[in-house]
Image (cartoon, rainbow, N blue to C red):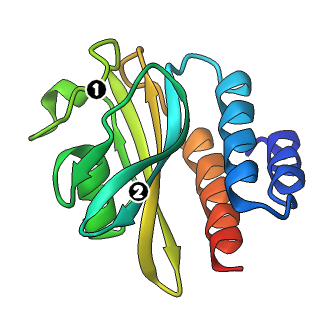
Amino acid sequence: MNKLLIEQVRQILSEEDKLAALCNLTALLYSETPNINWVGFYFHKKGKLILGPFQGKVACTQIDIGKGVCGTSFQNKLLLNVSDVHEFPGHIACDSASNSELVIPLTVNNVAVGVLDIDSPLFNRFELEEEETFLEVAKFVSEKLAA
């Protein structure tokens, strides 16, 4: 796990305003994570996942629950590490340059409230260390959202 990154995440999330904190958090993750082309959040609103703070190219603004990697991760409350998004049933291609994806659900009181989504132009990009680091980030974000 990247301890320096986690400490920076904690400091950013100490910001009182949740939106400002998440905006800066996506900037940090985007600039400090090699070989990614998109990082951001989707939040559950009115039965869909709605785009939140992000860094990268223009993104899909709404995702149906259970659709694509994000919708499936959210629905099942499971981390999904997809080594080749083109082989994922129902994959939603917001950026055709993305080839692998890591999606981690955000939960408050065991209720899914959104996802942290990280895309890479590389196939099989996300190893166990990144999973552990981003799981920790998602845990801190979930705590921030619950506050």
Helix, strand or loop under label 2: loop
Relative vertical location of residue 69 with respect to residue 101 in this rendering, above or below: below
Residue of label 2? 79
Give the amino acid type for the residue marked by disc 1 in the picture.
Answer: Cys
Q: Which mark is residue 129?
A: none
Residue 49 vs residue 77, the one in the foreground? 49
**Which of marks 2 and 1 precedes in the sequence?**
2
Q: In the rendering, at what x and y percent does residue 84 appear?
A: 26, 26
- Asked whether disc 1 touches disc 2, contact meaning CB atoms under 8 Å apart, the reply is no
| Direction from residue 4 to residue 22 in the image, left or right | left
Q: In the rendering, at what x and y percent does residue 127 appear?
A: 52, 35
Say which residue appears at 46% left-offset and 25% top-offset. Answer: 125
Say which residue appears at 20% left-offset and 44% top-offset. Answer: 68
Residue of label 1? 94
Residue 99 picture quarter: top left
Residue 97 picture quarter: top left
State which quarter of the image contains the C terminus: bottom right
| Alpha carbon separation for disc pair 1 and 2 | 20 Å
| Direction from residue 68 to residue 97 in the image, left or right | right
